[in-house]
Structure formats: structure tokens, C-alpha cells
Amino acid sequence: MESGMRKLFANPYMPELGHLRGKDPLELEDAQRIIFFPRLSDMEFYAKMFSRDTPEATAKREQNLKFKLMSVFYTIHRLDGGLVDRFIHLCGLQSLVALLGEEHRVIQSQAIELLTDFLGPQMSLPAATSSRQAHIQHQIYSCLSSKKFWRNLARILEEPGEVFPKSHTSSIRLLAAAVGWLHHGAETVPEAALPSDVKVASAALQKCLDSGIHLMPEIRGAAEDLLEELNPIPSIRSDPLRGEQLHAAQAAIFDPEAQQEEDAAHAWQALRKLGNEAFKVGLLWPAEAAYRLALEDGEASLPETEGSLIASNRALVLIKAGHFAQAAESAADALARDPRNAKAAYRRAQALLEQCAEVADSSALALAQDAAAAAERAAALEPQDKKVTELLEKSKARVQSLTDEAAPTAGLEGMD
């Protein structure tokens, strides 16, 4: 997985992502951000790609991108509540239903797991009290009442054996939950009816029960109860949000200025977390990119103390990567944001001292002096820290050494 992530980071399908937006290939950093460090609004790429028809014979690279995006989303982004919320608003549930129809067992398994995880908490909530909540329920309704939902789950149930672990059990549970939610508080209105594809699902369910496939007693019982509920096709609740109310809710949720503010507020928190996780497993450049983007994308809402911590973390990554000049600059940025950030002062001293060792001209002394000044600042903030004391002594020793080396030359130049 780690090797695959590295390759994807280096080659993040820039032309294909650009095509999704209807533009030329994206820049490398934009493509990397969408895949690894997405803004809330970038969830549009995921929902669109998951819904896209990508025949292997004619759209192999797009299909590869779809499956890789799913892998990243399933592994990383599903843990971010803000991203999941925006994904659902952007028709993400319907896009996962589309993935259930793929001839790829791992993708099908991941899709049904995500649908179950995302729908469960939302389906247990009471009636919406805000237009934003109502829009989420509208998305649930659109997902569960869609033809693809019933037809794709029917295809899984028709299989004579498990196509992925607990495929039949998961499908029965999801269908039962869908019927329970859709039927709850059903209104007698003409448009509130399930699609005719429910009959296809009923037939598949009956075939599953008749085939002798091993099912736990409670699952078999749920399947039998479900068959009774689906014959005849039941009435269901009406769409929780429609007409002018739907258009007004979408206008508010997807207002460009509102999205920009939400992106910024989410960015620095999510990206800092991603940077920390990447650093822990040794992914230095993904970590550096996450911290840098956190500072750039979150600038509008980033508190100075938090910005200082992120810039200091970026300095540490750059030191580990051997980019000492950039590390010193990032540490200086951290100190400008919060002058009492002792770690930033320590890391600036480290970076400057390492940079000093790489040069062989007169700038070495100035770098050593700056390192000593940064170390003195760190020592003033953390006087009991032994590592800080050691770095201060090392910096002063380096200044003295370079001063002594320069002294004979200066003396000769002064003679006449």
C-alpha cells in the first residue's frame, strides 16, 4: 500500500482529473492535493469519478484512477467527518451505489461497507430541523429510491457464492435498512413509490434463500420479512426536500463564498492531521506538502499559534529531508507567527547549523551566528532542556571555530 501511495503521489493522473473538470491537465500540486489533501469542495471529483462509466477496453486509465481514488477515500478520507458530509451533499451516496455495479470485488466490498457506515447514523436521526440536514436526507432518499440501488444489490444477491466476505448478508442488511427508512412515516402521494427494479431485488432475494447459501438465522429471518414487505411494492415517504426548497438549500450549501470559507476552516485542521500521519510512517514529501497546503489553504481562518505549530512541523520535515535552507525559512515563519515557539527556535538553529556545514565560503560564519542566536532564543524559552543546551554549546563552538579560522587571514590583510 505504501509503495502504491508513493507512486500515486508522483504520478497523480493529472490529465484525467483535468478532464473531470472539463479543463486541461491539472498542475502536479493541484492533482496531489485533490487525491491526498482534498478540500471539502474537492469531494466533487470523487463523486463524479465514482459515478463515471469507465469500460476497461476504452477507458483503462480513467478506470485505474477511479479505483485508486476509491482506495484512498476508503483508507484515509472516510475518517474525516467534514469530507464525508460534503461528499454526501455532492451525491456521493449515489456514486457509491454506482460502484456496487463494478466487476471488481474489492471495490464492491468497499462500496457496500461505506454505504452502510455513512447511511447508518443518518438514517437514525429524527426529522430535519435545518435545510442542510434536509438536504442530507434528500440525498439518502435519492440513493435508496434509485433504480441502481436495487438492481446492483440484486446482482450481488443472485451470485451463487460469496463475491466478497459476507456479500449476501451485507446486501440483505442494507436492503432491510433501506425499506425501514423509506417506509417510515410513508405518505400517500402519487410520486412516493419505489422503482419497478424492486421486483428484480425481490426475485434475487428469493433466489438467495432458495439456493441454500449459508445465512445466519437472524439474516435469513430478515430476508424473509423483507420479501413480505416488498410484495406488493410498498408505498414510501416522499422526498424530504424538493422544489423551491431544494433549490434554495443547494444555493446556500454550494454558494462559492461559503464554500471558500468552509474549505479554509477545514483545510488547516485536516491537513495538519494528514501531515502528522504521513510523517509518522516516513512519508516526508507528502507530509511537507500537507503542512505547506495547511498554511496556504487555511490562511484565512488559521490562528497564529496553530500556524506556528504547523510551520514548525514543516521545518522538522525539511530538516529530515536534508533541505536545510527551506527548513530555516519555515522555522522563521513559525517564530514570526508565535515568538514563544521554542521548538521552532530549536529547529531553526538546527537547520542553520546544518546549512553552515554545507558551505565553504564567508557565509558560513553568518549562518553559524544566526544558529547561535536561534539556539539562545530556544534556551531562553526552555532553559531546562538538555538538547537545547547542547545545541547552543555546539553553535557557539562553531562560531568560535569559524572566527578563529578567519582571524589569520584578517591579520595578514591588515599588515602593510
Image (cartoon, grey):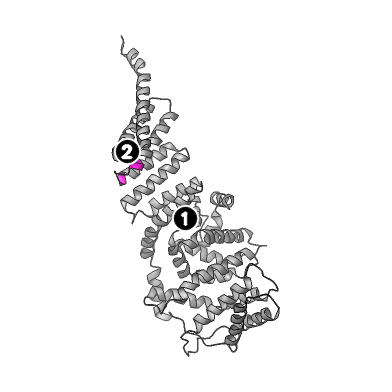
Q: Secondary structure at mark 1?
A: loop
> Where is mark 1, residue-wise?
37
Which percent across, then down, holds residue 277? 47, 52
- Tell me the distance, in whole angstroms, between the alpha carbons under discs 1 and 2: 38 Å
Q: Residue furthest top?
A: 416
Task: Identify residue type, mark 2.
Answer: Gln
Which percent across, then down, holds residue 353? 40, 32
Residue ID at (54%, 54%): 14
Residue 339 lies in the magenta-colored region: yes
Count neighbours of disc 2 (C-alpha within 10 A) and say few if under 14, some if 14 to 19, many if 20 or more. few
Q: Secondary structure at mark 2?
A: loop
195 relative position to 134: left or right: right
Residue 69 lies in the magenta-colored region: no
Which percent across, then down, holds residue 59? 63, 61
119 relative position to 203: left or right: left
Confirm or deny contact between disc 1 and disc 2 (CB under 8 A): no
Task: Identify residue type, mark 1.
Answer: Phe
Up/down of 252 relative to 203, above or below: above
The span picked out in magenta is: 336-344
From this viewpoint, is residue 51 visible? no
From this viewpoint, is residue 400 visible? yes
Residue ID at (40%, 68%): 254
Please state which of residues 166 and 337 is positioned toward the viewer in this rendering: 166
What number is the disc on residue 384? Answer: 2
What number is the disc on residue 115? Answer: none
Count neighbours of disc 1 (C-alpha within 10 A) and say few if under 14, some if 14 to 19, many if 20 or more. many
